[in-house]
Amino acid sequence: RYALPDIEGDIFTLDLPQGAVVLSTGVIHRQPVLWATADPAQPLQPRTFLQLRTGRHTDHDESALRFIGTYVTGGDLPWVFHVFEVTK
């Protein structure tokens, strides 16, 4: 499990073990997370992700995005976010 960073803008990078397979997103204790299968003994590799709130538009080439999952933040006014990995 990898915590998603607080980001400004829509793009963020996570250092994941080489060969990690990203599975899905969710929320644990109000913290957005990303789940992946990974061998922690492998060297870290930066991976780039796009996080969009529902209704937001992106100029990224959609063919370069792989959908990972959707999560909902808590609170009185919840937000819905969609996470994609930037593959190109």
Image (cartoon, rainbow, N blue to C red):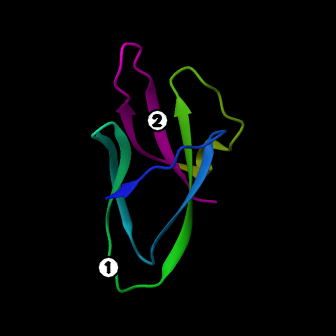
For the N terminus, the quadrant is bottom left
Residue 17 picture location, percent across and down? 42, 76
Main SS, magenta region, reads: strand
Residue 6 picture location, percent across and down? 53, 44
Asked whether the residues under the numbered discs 2 and 1 touch, taking CB atoms below 8 Å apart as contact, a structural biologist would say no
* Residue type of the residue flagged with mark 1: Asp
Give the magenta-colored segment's residue range: 66-88
Seen in the picture, residue 37 relative to 48 is either above or below; the reply is: below
Label tally:
2
Residue 71 lies in the magenta-colored region: yes
Residue visible at 35% across and 86% down? Answer: 41
Residue 18 lies in the magenta-colored region: no
Residue visible at 40% across and 19% down? Answer: 78
Seen in the picture, residue 56 relative to 33 is either above or below; the reply is: above
Q: Mark 1 points at which residue?
A: 39
Q: Mark 2 points at which residue?
A: 82
For the C terminus, the quadrant is bottom right
